[in-house]
Amino acid sequence: MMFMNFRRIRKCLCLQVVATLFVLSVVMVCWEQLDNNIVSHAKSYTYRYLVNSYGFLNKSFTISRQDAERLSSHRYLINHEGKCAGRDVLLLLFVKTSPENVERRRSIRSTWGNETYIRQELSAHVKVVFALGIHQDPQRRESTQQALLAEDRKYHDLVQQDFTDTFHNLTIKLLQQFRWAHAYCGHARFLMSADDDIFVHMPNLVRYLREMDQRGVRDFWVGRVHRGAPPNRHKDSKYYVPYEMYQWSSYPDYTAGAGYVVSGDVASKIYRASLTLNSTLYIDDVFMGICANVMGVSPQEHVFFSGEGKAPYHPCIFGKMITSHGHVNDIHDLWKVATSLKVQKISGGLLGRLYCTVVRVALLCKPYYVDTYPCKSAFL
Ligand SMILES: *[C@@H]1O[C@H](CO)[C@@H](O)[C@H](O)[C@H]1NC(C)=O
Ligand SMILES: *[C@@H]1O[C@H](CO)[C@@H](O)[C@H](O)[C@H]1NC(C)=O
Ligand SMILES: *[C@@H]1O[C@H](CO)[C@@H](O)[C@H](O)[C@H]1NC(C)=O
Ligand SMILES: *[C@@H]1O[C@H](CO)[C@@H](O)[C@H](O)[C@H]1NC(C)=O
């Protein structure tokens, strides 16, 4: 009997040791990954101050005007020089799209990018322009181009340049926007750049920009800010950047490319910076950060510009949201509920505000990381 018990205990112990070893090895593997991440972030964060404060970037990215011109100027294939003319334009809104994303453009035109709605319901002049290049597949290029021309005859809102529309050419698309703004829309009070899979709460955005305009803001650049982000040095990553392309351990501060807004004076500064900088760095939002850094402009955080995640669906969120990421199929529904009058009613009055704060805390303050709006936004 005693012998049996002893054997059982030994077996138990053995299992325990094996289990412990297993857990330990998992922890070690994870730790190494975590550690790498933590170390590279800590390192880049200490570099951040240097990169943001001194002229390193200007020095390493400045090239001759001719070289910069050669890298960044592309012929227009579709253009509307007069789209912005005359009127007092509050916002020039660029939607970065690709030739094949016909459905996304259609959805945007009939929801948050509907200029007529914005003019009639919000009494604001917002110009919505879709920025794109040419189809990346040469075999489908011709047919897609015909379809694009037909689409443009109907809506007059495409601006296309002669470059291949790919991830690695996004910086060309960035410069396309700032060049177009400089050439044809220099009087717009604000410029926004948005992906075609985000949702923009246009009434909230217009209200916010009007307020900023009344304050006469300058050097204004707002969005979801990345501070001291390290370059990705993993060769198999989409965001991989070799040392030759960017030599420092930290990027300058920049806003996520999915959606950000700059004031007119910043738009023109970015344009001017782009005339003398090497634009081969293909991470477009980082390159925007470099241009701004050279001109002495730094971004500011707005908590209701979302990160990668979708905003939670709730009237108490809709009352505050500016952008939310990752909306393609639900965009019509979201537009309907997010702009309905019920939203204003629910958060009205002291009780409404209190109720909404509680709801937002419940939705946004999670013990784990969700990349939508930060917890502190619940209290605003
Ligand atoms: C950037 O560097 C160039 C030459 O290296 C210099 O001419 C220019 O004034 C600098 N720009 C700023 C904003 O410091
Ligand atoms: C844009 O909004 C106007 C006014 O609300 C509406 O009449 C029109 O149908 C909308 N356009 C689209 C494409 O949905
Ligand atoms: C970017 O566009 C240029 C001009 O069309 C093209 O030569 C180049 O291959 C494109 N780059 C990528 C990565 O597609
Ligand atoms: C721009 O930078 C790239 C590296 O990213 C380099 O290969 C290229 O020579 C530079 N262009 C000019 C004109 O200096």
Image (cartoon, grey):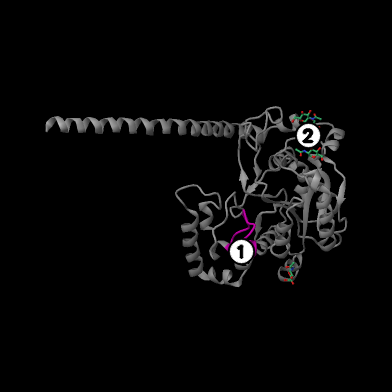
Quadrant in which the C terminus appears? bottom right
The answer to whether residue 112 is above or below residue 341 is: above
Which numbered marker is on residue 96? none
At 82% from the left and 50% from the top, the residue drawn is: 160
Quadrant in which the N terminus appears? top left
Q: Position of residue 153 (x, y in %)?
A: 85, 61
Query: Is 332 in the magenta?
Result: yes
Q: What kind of element bears circle 1? A: helix
Q: Nearer the viewer, residue 149 or 203?
A: 149
Kindly report the distance in space between the C-alpha atoms of the residues bearing marks 1 and 2: 40 Å
**Image quarter of residue 56:** top right
The answer to whether residue 285 is above or below residue 36 is: below
Which numbered marker is on residue 278? 2
Magenta region: which residues? 318-333
| Mark 2 residue CB less than 8 A from any atom of ligand 4 | yes
How many residues crowd around disc 2 within 10 Å: few (fewer than 14), some, or many (20 or more)? Answer: many
Question: Is any part of residue 343 visible from this angle?
Answer: yes
Q: Nearer the viewer, residue 175 or 162?
A: 162
Q: What kind of element bears circle 2? A: loop
Question: Is any part of residue 134 visible from this angle?
Answer: no
> Which kind of residue does numbered mark 2 sit on?
Asn
> Which kind of residue does numbered mark 1 sit on?
Leu
Which residue, given by chain and number where applicable, does mark 1 sit on?
334
Q: For ligand 2, give the image quadrant.
A: bottom right
Looking at the image, tell me whether mark 1 or mark 2 is earlier in sequence order.
2
| Mark 1 residue CB less than 8 A from any atom of ligand 2 | no
Q: Position of residue 225 (x, y in %)?
A: 62, 45
